[in-house]
Image (cartoon, helix red, strand yellow):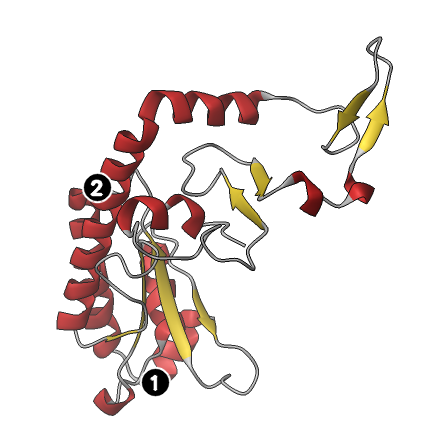
Amino acid sequence: DAASGGFVAPFVNPDLVWDFRLEKVVSINVSGHKYGLVYPGVGWCIWRDPKYLPTELIFNINYLGADQASLTLNFSRGASQVLGQYYQLIRLGKHGYRAIMFNLTRTADYLAASVEKMGFKLMSQTRGKGLPLVAFRLNPDDGHKFDEFAIAHQLRQRGWVVPAYTMAPHSEGLKMMRVVVREDFSRSRCDALIADIKLAMETLGKMDEQKIKEHKE
């Protein structure tokens, strides 16, 4: 499953062995509408060898005048997303995707360093070791009266949709926030987000616990 990383790792971290270089990997699926840089929704899958392709996924049709094997969803649909992906692959090529992914990684690292300076604990990896995203949470040792959900609410009032959520079972007490760096997330836009996070922290810091609770509701 390389839904997001399949269009990141090959360009940012080409020495990472995760693909068909591993003997046990027989198929790789990617969501083109993520870092494939195409609008929703398009996804595709490649197999190491035809022998690994499940036969139950293949439909044999002959309504076009000859027998033909079809491996696709069995209903009519538009092809605009497929054309969009084909266009991006031809237009950008390896060099273009590499340049874009490196730029996204640099922006993510810049944002990560900035939130760390604000006192947040970084939960995601940097320097191309992961996806170009920043996951972070408040440092519990700082004793804030507000939580990540209150910050997310403040940011939403300023036009940002930065999700805050609790972790999986047995870690429900851990809250975090996440920013996924997209192609249109420029350095100037990143600076604007950083400024609004600082402002949100300052605003919440001036509220008492009851006011913060009412504010979130």
Residue 53 to residue 150: above or below: above
* Residue at 84% in and 18% down: 67
Q: Position of residue 145 (x, y in %)?
A: 30, 85
Q: Position of residue 112 (x, y in %)?
A: 21, 63
Q: Amino acid at mark 2?
A: Ser
Is residue 192 left or right of 38 when viewed as pictured? left
Towards the viewer: 121 or 212 = 121
Residue underneath mark 1: 209
Towards the viewer: 43 or 116 = 43
* Residue at 70% in and 24% down: 77
Residue 197 to residue 117: above or below: above
Position of the N terminus, as image quadrant, is bottom right
* Residue at 82% in and 11% down: 64
User: Tag 1: Cα neighbours inside 10 Å, few (<14), some, or many (≥20)?
Assistant: some
* Residue at 57% in and 39% down: 43
Q: Position of residue 196 (x, y in %)?
A: 22, 58
Residue underneath mark 2: 186
Residue 12 to residue 119: above or below: above
User: Tag 2: Cα neighbours inside 10 Å, few (<14), some, or many (≥20)?
Assistant: some
Q: Secondary structure at mark 2?
A: loop
Sequence order check, earlier mark of 1 and 2: 2
Q: Secondary structure at mark 1?
A: helix
**Nearer mark to the viewer, of 1 and 2:** 2
Measure the alpha-carbon separation of dots 1 and 2: 35 Å
